[in-house]
Image (spheres, rainbow, N blue to C red):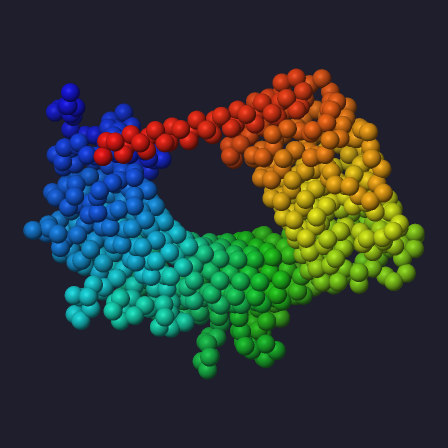
Amino acid sequence: MDFQFPANLKRYNILIGICQFSSLWYGGALERTLKLTDYSWTSRSLFTTVEDLSFAKLKGVKDLLYDLDVEGFPQLKHLYIQDTDELLHLINPRRLMNPHSAFLNLETLVLDNLYKIEEICHGPMHTQSFAKLKVIKVTSCHRLKNLFLYSLTVNLSQLHEIEISSCEGMSEIIAVEKQEDQKELQQIVLPELHSVTLRRLLELQSFYCLLTVDQGNPSNQSNTLALFNNQEVLIPKLETLELYDMNVCKIWDDKLSVLSCFQNLTRLIVIKCKHLTSLFSSGVARALVKLQHVEISSCERLKIIFVLEEVNITISPLSTTSLQKLRILRISECDELEEICGSSNEGDPPLGDIAFMKLEELTLKCLPRLRSFCQGSYDFRFPSLQIVRLKECPMMEIFCQRNITTPSLTKVEYRLSGDNWYTSGDHWYGDLNTTVRTVFTKKDQYNPDLGKLAIRDNNDLKSIWPNLVTPNSFPNLTKIVISSCESQYVFPIHVAKVLRQLQVLKISFCTIENIVEESDSTCDMMVVYLQVQKCHDMMTIVPSSVLFHSLDVLHVYWCERLVNIIRPSTTTSLTNLRILRISECHELEEIYGSSNEGDAPILDEIAFMKLEELTLNNLPRLTSFCQGSYDFRFPSLQKVHLKDCPMMETFCHGNLTTTSHIEVRCLYRWRNEESEDHWDGDLNTTIRKFSLERYMSTKLQNIEQDLTSSSESDDS
């Protein structure tokens, strides 16, 4: 019996294919949604009145308009297309006998993962197509070279938002057709465009370029081509510009009349744009009169934020009319950045006054080469500044070279490294320059009364320890944090032996192979809390030469080469271990190393007497706690949490003694919901049962997918 569509239904949605899609994209009503497995039987008349249309895994369609609805979807408001590998164009005027307007009422267009789409419109469209388009979002359309053709932009008077992500082949947003490139082109105006977000468009160099494909790729013409390179495109109401992981060399041309293009820009986010060397020229900075929020992060070649002077031209300094609305300035992880306001007049006579009248928050974080806010001879005024955060800026000796006025500022949140003994916390010494200078001076004043020590970016850790270290050296040192250091080990054996008060040890981003240098003698460290993170050269955490009788908590995160955590010969040293958490160690196969270790004694039973909590998270090669046939005893174990350990089928291969009930929670494939307690009598049985359930669930999903694919194939 053929399906009869209700003749009196005037407004409805159609969803064709298996689509991970929600009406939240556009506010459609699911109760009026017709869900179909394919479009083969669908009457074309349905497409003339549908308002919301969603496609997934669409087959047999290359030109959407020609193949589905030559009338142009006159009532369609929202179009979503996902996971389709045959579609080449939405509109191809060359295949239409009488090219006419299409998508006259379309407001939202979302294209996601369309493998072969090359153009939205294949050729000029001198019609009212897309005249009501407000939002366009495009993701993972790798053959798409541009978003709009020049002839189509005249219709985009209502366009409000552009968001493009991960389109590897996109070289420009607006392109000129071959038929248009010899004509005198009119200025493009996008009068209602408020937001532009561009993510990972590695070939994109310019928003709009006159060069056509036949004339060459604009990205190959000049290394200084700016994203907004000329005055052919006006975006007078643009408020938000966000750029992520782009290869652009410049955002604005220095000679661009920004006042007529970006005078309403209020929010600028620039992240992972590795070819940028500066952000604002003097002229650009003066024109951004409404800019309030600036965030810059992970731009590895960025050396200057504000260029105060240009080559061979003296530019008057920023005045109260420059960036007069800027409230928040956040800059982080730009490895080459040396100053915020760049100037070539370092040490020369005073050049004038620079004012950031509305700036309330300044955050400078992880800037290893930053020397000061400005190295030039300027006075600075920050009448509204209330929050200054300086974190991980080890070279910053002073804020600026001359006078600075900050009437509303009473403290600086300062941190040199994760838990630095002196510089963590709030500091104030009368003014901003004095505060930065004082903290910088005192950061290296380590002394025998030192309680906490943080070491960062040091390529020879042995050099920081005095040659003669006695049992009385560092008698109060209780905490050490090591970060981003290159060395074979953290402690020489003679140093490790005398740090009797050390309780907390954190190590991260280091090339170390061992915590303590290898030695024939053993060393008993009194550490209570040990955290190791992103130390990819370590193969074990607790070596045979180190005893940790006092260790209470052990956390290990993302150490790629780890093959085990504990060696057999060190088990008896972990008598007080209470919490053990291991995450993101992709080579880890077992927690307790089962390989023979020379003369290490063979234990009948291995006991972790005080272990209460065991967490194992995202360990793709972990097969069990121990691959050897040892017996284990955990008399205090209360919690075992497993997440994404797909190879773990049992806890251990020998006998296992635990408490009568353990809270066992297992999650798989990054499900974030709270897991139920899986306890089933004993730990080995519990993990085996969960492993079997996970296997059967995966198998069932694969069968369902195969049946669905087979059904779709039969229908076609």
Q: Quadrant of residue 176?
A: bottom left
Q: Position of residue 14 (x, y in %)?
A: 23, 32
The percent position of residue 611, horizontal first and vertical second, equals: 75, 30
* Residue beneath the point at 31% across and 55% down: 143
Above or below residue 506? Residue 710 is above
> Which residue, as the protein is rendered here, is positioned at the far bottom?
312
Say which quadrant the N terminus sits in.
top left
Is residue 45 or residue 288 the one in the foreground? Answer: 45
Residue 439, horizontal then vertical, whole percent:
71, 59
Given residues 423 and 147, the one toward you in this image is: 147
Specify whether 367 is left or right of 54. Answer: right
Quadrant for the C terminus in the image: top left
The count of marks equals 0
Q: Is residue 441 left or right of residue 79?
A: right
Residue nearer the viewer, 419 or 39: 39
The residue under the point 52% across, 27% down is 694
Q: Nearer the viewer, residue 303 or 166?
A: 166
* Picture residue at 40% right of the left edge, 61% below the top: 288
Is residue 195 visible from the viewing direction of this image? no
Question: Residue furthest toward the left?
Answer: 98
Q: Is residue 192 above or below residue 84?
A: below
Residue 54 picture location, percent across and down: 27, 37
Q: Quadrant of residue 187?
A: bottom left
Q: Quadrant of residue 463?
A: bottom right
Residue at coordinates 59% horizontally, 71% vertically from top-left?
375
* Residue 633 is at least partly visible in this image: yes
